[in-house]
Amino acid sequence: MNRVGRSMKRAILIMAVMLASGGVAEAQPANSGPGGLSDSEMRELLDAVKATSRAVRENVEYNRVVPDILTQILAKLDKLENKLDKIENKLDKIDDTIKREARRNGR
């Protein structure tokens, strides 16, 4: 699976945990934070959200850069292909000239 898919799954999982934690708030002690999460759980959740945000940002940047690089590579390959076609055409002309000369000389 690509990086964007994993990041999206992670973000969805975090959102599901946040939503699910709201339903168990009544079972948590009164000193727990919003949504029934303790302070350490809230910090872990925020760290996970930050990591997901960084991963999504990296994926967006990666998806911007890769097509540019691929376009440049394809352009270079097209130029090489054109040069090879020119060389092939010149070799064909030389080969035809040699064959004509051989026929003309009776070989």
Image (cartoon, rainbow, N blue to C red):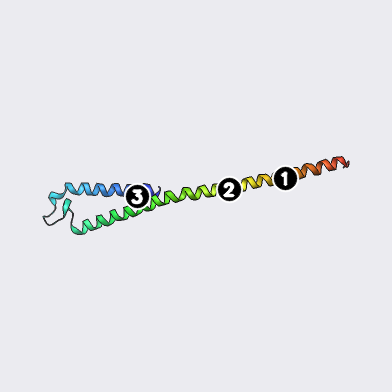
SS at badge 2: helix
Task: Verify CB contact (< 8 Å) between mark 1 and mark 3.
Answer: no
* Residue identified by numbered label 2: 77
Residue 105's spot in the image, x, y percent?
88, 42
Amino acid found under the numbered disc labelled 3: Ser
Question: In screen coordinates, is 49 left or right of 70?
Answer: left
Total numbered labels placed on residues in the image: 3
Residue 47's spot in the image, x, y percent?
27, 57
Label 1 Cα neighbours within 10 Å, binned few <14 / some 14-19 / many ≥20: few
Q: CA distance from mark 3 to mark 2?
A: 34 Å
* Residue identified by numbered label 3: 7
Amino acid found under the numbered disc labelled 1: Lys
At 28% from the left edge and 48% from the top edge, which residue is drawn?
13
SS at badge 1: helix
Q: Considering depth in this image, is 66 or 1 the residue closer to the camera?
A: 66
Question: In screen coordinates, is 78 left or right of 23?
Answer: right
Q: Considering depth in this image, is 100 or 22 the residue closer to the camera?
A: 100
Amino acid found under the numbered disc labelled 2: Leu
Q: CA distance from mark 1 to mark 2?
A: 20 Å
- Which circle marks residue 90 in the picture? 1
- Which circle marks residue 6 in the picture? none
Residue 63's spot in the image, x, y percent?
42, 49
Label 3 Cα neighbours within 10 Å, binned few <14 / some 14-19 / many ≥20: some
Sequence-wise first label, 1 or 2: 2
